[in-house]
Amino acid sequence: MATIKDLSMKCGVSVSTVSKALNGYHDISEQTRALVLRHASEMGYFPDANARALKMKKTCNIGVLYMDSSRQSLRNEYFAHILASFKEKVSRRGYDITFIEHNIGNRKMSYLEHCKQRNFDGICIACVTEFNDPEILELVNSDIPVVVIDHVFNGAISILSDNINGMRELIQYIINQGHKDIAYIHGTKSSVTHNRLVSFYNIMNENGLEVNEDFILEGEYRNVSKTEEITDKLLNLSKKPTCIIAPDDYSALGVMNVAGRRGIKIPQELSVAGFDGILFTKVLEPNLTTVRQDVDAIGAEAAKQLINLIESPMTTSLESICLQTQLIEGGTVKKL
Amino acid sequence: MATIKDLSMKCGVSVSTVSKALNGYHDISEQTRALVLRHASEMGYFPDANARALKMKKTCNIGVLYMDSSRQSLRNEYFAHILASFKEKVSRRGYDITFIEHNIGNRKMSYLEHCKQRNFDGICIACVTEFNDPEILELVNSDIPVVVIDHVFNGAISILSDNINGMRELIQYIINQGHKDIAYIHGTKSSVTHNRLVSFYNIMNENGLEVNEDFILEGEYRNVSKTEEITDKLLNLSKKPTCIIAPDDYSALGVMNVAGRRGIKIPQELSVAGFDGILFTKVLEPNLTTVRQDVDAIGAEAAKQLINLIESPMTTSLESICLQTQLIEGGTVKKL
DNA sequence: CTGAAAGCGCTTACAG
DNA sequence: CTGAAAGCGCTTACAG
């Protein structure tokens, strides 16, 4: 690729002048600037990003961490959608995205070391199940601007759905449909899971309904077979629930499958709800009753906050931002 | 971050010596090397990747292009899975992944210019619908090593499923189940679509079956509502198909939805098949009859080929590599 | 075996 | 308004 030196020779001016002309400095005559710009575009010249980064301490590159114990990574639709939106937003602001890994070339290193070597301007932590991993804490506590999806850390910006209110709306809707015996197969413990559970209990209580402890069982997010197993347990109880809430939309298929096998019609004989509002549930018929998380907004907000933090650290507060969810009534919760 | 200069002062040797010790040169005494290594790890020193890249003309970074006209990007499960596998494989070989965009900072540029500025060691082109876009051609014809998913370019490595054989197995299976009136809603024109179509015609002919032109309609990949529309048309024909093949698994939901609305039972009264073998069809009951593309293998093979091309250009041939597919019989094609 | 020097491609005080 | 010089953090011939 042509270098700034080639360009300066072509223009017959010094390298310094070329650089200043290109970077919009004002102590350059309009004539010279025009000359430089013309030759630059003729030669297809663009400054080397590495050299520029080295000098300016700014890479215009954001590190994204996708690491979860089940190694779903981009295979998790929810996070893939968030990343897609995040990517679109940051790219419009001139930042690229690079995944954070454990090595460069054949050197092994920690995530933080990777970020330091690559000189990322900021970091987005998403799709992590192990929030207590010391490597994650090291990242969050570093001096690199960080935004975290779906988890609250002291001293970092967090973006997450309003799980409490989302769950409230869902449960209230189900109760309004006449259900009292509601089972909740919740995901593995996490702050998100905790908030949803708390909300579940609260709304039940507010409505004067008692929570049947047999109906609260731990499943796993996105694990269909585990949800099937638990659904089987629930349907074998002498006192059965009239409605089952799955950890998420995807695992809700597990509830449907078991019902199908037992010849139980949904929603006529059993109601089901999910959480997430992911793609395929929109087109499945009947539409799944669920709480839609606004993945586009989550990604975009994460991007916006992170870039603010990078570019205006002193006016960006490190708070957690809750995004509204939307109740999708769908057709899998029957009016009793 | 600590620089090599800090480290050299700590060690009391020159910067050159430190660099050589770190990089495994042999003209360094074992004593000195040990000293340097010890201090390096104590200080948490890692060489700045940008400075290194500048000097060595090697970034250990691969550009990935995700650009499709429908702006699905990572939201397309098929490509998200391929990318996940690609990412895992290249990272194990020490390469990072950065998405190719149209700008860095506030400079607009072409994809190629972006790659040149970032000095990517190689490029993976995936998730592209516009293979004739001049920007894509520019990338493919550049001197940067390139691997392309799902499209064959002269002079570039291509990775794709064996669509011809995959389709053969699917159609033959459907025919063996006793179907003669098979409709094929195919995706938008592309080389992949073309090969599947050709294969469809060929297998029909080989089996002495005539293709009913009314049964061959153009839909769109991953477009459920379009598939619903076309399914409606097909089911309104006086002579109806007994089996409908959708552009892919996702759009196959469209066929199922229309059937559901009309009270047509699948597979008892109408058979359906898809293509891709994506996640949710594995857990949907009855399992969709489909052709599974081995997304893990596609991503891994793309990674392997690209890295070979980067590291050993003279022993890596620019060919297209076809990966085997697998017929998933599932339960949506009835034995007539 | 070690180190001074040049250079990768840029930017930016500083002097003129 | 323009340009020579220093420097960002590295690597690597080259000299000793």
Image: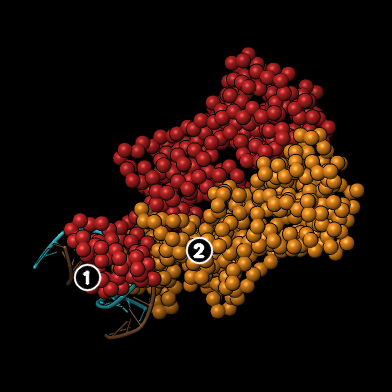
Chain colours: A orange, B red, C brown, D cyan
Query: Residue B319, how many percent across, how many down?
Result: 40, 34
Q: Residues within 10 Å of mark 1 (few under 14, many from 20)?
A: some
In-image side of B13 versus A46 (left or right): left
Q: In the picture, residue B23 is in which quadrant?
A: bottom left
Q: Amino acid at mark 1?
A: Val
Chain assignment, label 1? B
Which secondary structure lies at badge 1? loop
Is residue B93 in view?
A: yes
Marks 2 and 1 in Cβ contact (< 8 Å): no
Q: Horizontal placement of B17 versus C12: left or right? A: left
| Residue denoted by label 1 | B13
As drawn, B53 above or below A140: above
Mark 2 or 1: in front is: 2
Q: Residues within 10 Å of mark 2 (few under 14, many from 20)?
A: few
Residue at screen point 49% across, 54% down? B99
Distance between mark 2 and mark 1 Cα atoms: 34 Å
The type of residue carrying mark 2 is Pro
Residue A94 in percent (x, y) is at: 51, 64
Marks 2 and 1 share the same chain: no
Q: Is residue A166 left or right of residue B200?
A: right
Decide if residue A172 is in sight here. no
Task: Identify which residue, B319 or B190, lies in the foreground.
Answer: B319
Q: Which disc is residue A134 wearing? A: 2
